[in-house]
Image (spheres, helix red, strand yellow):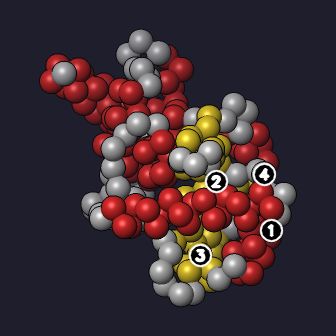
Amino acid sequence: MSEESTNLIQQTLREVVQLLRENQITDFLLIGGNAVIAYGVPRFTRDIDFVIPEREERNWRLLMDANGFELINGTPAFCQFLDTGKKKPRIDLMIVEESTWEKLNAAPFYGNFGEDLEVPLAAPQHIIAMKLKACQAEYRRTDATDWSDIIELSRLHDLDPVSDSNFAKLVLRFGSEELLEQLIHDLHEKRSDS
């Protein structure tokens, strides 16, 4: 991905966050590739992903529509918006129930995207949980970076399923026994290579 594409993603993120603030929409967390980048994992991304409580879905739909983004895919748990001018990256929303939102938003982190733009992020372990689910999805692209994101977030944030039973439980809850074993193996390999 070119530097121009990266700048367009950051510019669009800035514009969307500004629109949210202007419209007093404060309940959102950045997830996906941009959050992973903010946590220190070098990678590329093509879109901007947020998680929101379901009570905010209507506000987002109205805001996106009023600002040139068309709903191209929508379910009770997920919405995708595409810039009608086809110049800006896609905006994806994961929509969660209030009880899930309260857990995700209990202690948000903040990512700095330059020029005083701080955006609330889902915690690393929450992003890992989402990516564990994505790893198991039948429809997932073969070039998706979910597994490498899980490894790098775990490594950079000292999340070790061997020494941290809570993290191991999270991997089992959102992944599987096989994914837990694979994570232990891959983290061990990463540490051996360092």
Badge 1 vs badge 4, beta-carbon distance below 8 Å: no
- In front here: 8 or 155? 8
Sequence-wise, which precedes: disc 2 or disc 3? 2
- In front here: 172 or 79? 79
**Where does label 3 land, which residue?**
81
- In front here: 22 or 136? 22
Secondary structure of the residue carrying tag 3 is strand
For the point 69% across and 75% down, which residue is it? 64
Residue 170: give x, y in percent of width and height: 52, 30
Image-quadrant location for residue 122 = top right
Q: Quadrant of the C terminus?
A: top left
- Position of 142 compared to 18: left or right? left
- Position of 186 compared to 106: left or right? left
Nearer to us: label 1 or label 4: 4
Badge 4 vs badge 2, beta-carbon distance below 8 Å: no
Secondary structure of the residue carrying tag 2 is strand
**Where does label 1 land, which residue?**
59
Secondary structure of the residue carrying tag 4 is loop
Q: Quadrant of the N terminus?
A: bottom left
Sequence-wise, which precedes: disc 2 or disc 1? 2
Badge 3 vs badge 4, beta-carbon distance below 8 Å: no
Secondary structure of the residue carrying tag 1 is helix
Above or below for 142 versus 101? below
Above or below for 100 versus 79? above
Amino acid under disc 3: Phe
For label 2, count other residues whose C-alpha is less than 10 Å away and answer few (under 14), some (14-19) or many (20+): many
**Where does label 4 land, which residue?**
26
